[in-house]
Amino acid sequence: MTARNIALYMFLVPAAAAAGEPMTLYQTLERLLTQTTKGQIVNGQREVSQARFNAQKIGYYLPEISLNTTLPAYRQSQDYDTYFGFPDPLLFKRTNVSGDGNIRLRQKIITGGELTLETQLSLRNDEYPSAIFGEDTREIAGFQTATDKRRLGNLYVQFNQPLFQTSPSRSAYFVSRDDLRKADIDWRVSRADLKREGITAFFDLLAAEVDRETAQNAGDLAVFTAKWDSAKFADSVITEETWIMSKSKRLEKQLAMFDASAAYEAKANDFNHLLNLAPESQVMLQVSSAPPPPDAQRSGRLLANADKSAETQLAAIKLAMAERELDKVRSSYGLNGTLSASYAIGRGTVTQSKPLAEVEDKIKTKDWRVSLDLSYPIWDGGAGGASVHSQELAYESTRLEYQAAQRNAQNKMTILLKRLEITYAKLSLLQQELNLAEKKLRDAEGRYQQGFLSDGALLENRIYYLDAKKKSLTTLKEYLLDLTDLEKTELPE
């Protein structure tokens, strides 16, 4: 007899959507992981990290394009001022129209540099006073409005590449990548923890039902015993003290029935809340046979991959992040440089309309620049060295944590596999005990029907059977919880 032969236990409990519908442990966990609030939160955290990493990765394949523009701005103003050549102040009205727009394209480069391409369009319509000279050019005959119209377009191309130091864009990429790796591990751990929570709620509810049934039978047995003790006291077979103790025990067992019922209702409420179920719905919870522990081949693989447990992987990611941060701090206090190159062209027209004359110029410009900017700190009062030393200590601490995680992973896995083996063997023995208790109960029920067994003896057999069932459920829960812990270590195929 092995734990594979564990019989199905079915209990009618308030739980799911359809009354009386069977629900296995697998269905419970599937609902918990995919249809509940907690399950959605676990999956959502991973999706957020995935989206952030995708955004950083896309930045190396597709450019970032932005459009910035303003609608033409219209402005009218009046100036009352003294102008050269006129003894009295003059009132001058002017109207200005302006507008700007640009399209910017930014492309990250795998080397850590950045390429920027930008086009600009500038429109200007400016009015200003222009003097009208008479026959004598030294005399001003009056004022007339002049205009300055500019229609200019520019194209700028710029490249920047950090030298001897960590690129901000590549740092952001590595951070998002590590966040995604951590999110994947956290997702695996959170799913396992959520399954543990579901297993615990499932078996606690079953155990609470067994406790309630046990309390009911124990109460009935106490009532039966109290009746017999009353008859014995009336016949002076027992003392009054024994009779009073029997009545007290009956009251105690009857009070325990209320406690067991309240505990069951609390576990049912916890189960419903965990699975987002309506309180009034009912299902029959089913417990099937226990899966066997890992075989020799799988155990060997688990031991070999013990250093790939969630704890160790998180420590490894943390170590890599600390190493990059150390390199970043070291590079920022050493020789730094930036290689920059730019090229710009401009095209457009500038038209000036003055009294009796109009001039239009064609604008064509070209500019380019290449520069290498270097910097090296000479003295900062020791702040730079202290910062580097502080980060070196942080890196060393992280490295020691990683080594400790590696050592502990092997020990934990060895203990976990051994505990699974022992618990599985214990389940086999408990199953045998449960089968014997069930057989004993069935025999007692047969003799009771024939009138060869009292009510009290039948109740005692029922309580013995329920106690065996409770021990089997408790051990099975512990075994399944340990199996779930393997999911934190065993990598998905």
Image: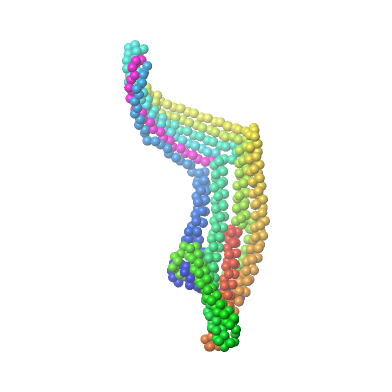
Which of the image's four quarters has the N terminus? bottom right
Read off the magenta span.
Answer: 85-110
Q: Outermost residue toward the top?
A: 136
Residue 305 to residue 60: above or below: below
Residue 438: x and y in percent read: 56, 79
Left-right relation of 419 to 454: right
Residue located at (42% from left, 26% from top): 363
Q: Nearer the viewer, residue 457 or 11?
A: 457
Quadrant of the image occupied by residue 151 = top left
348 in the magenta segment: no
Residue 284 to residue 312: above or below: below
Residue located at (39% from left, 26% from top): 350
Residue 205: x and y in percent read: 52, 68
Residue 118: x and y in percent read: 46, 35
Residue 4: x and y in percent read: 58, 72
Quadrant of the image occupied by residue 230 = bottom right
Label tally: 0
Residue located at (53% from left, 33% from top): 341
> Mostly what secondary structure, the magenta segment?
strand
Residue 60 to residue 368: above or below: below
Q: Is residue 336 visible?
A: yes
Q: Is residue 27 visible?
A: no
Residue located at (65% from left, 55% from top): 405
Which of the image's four quarters has the C terminus? bottom right
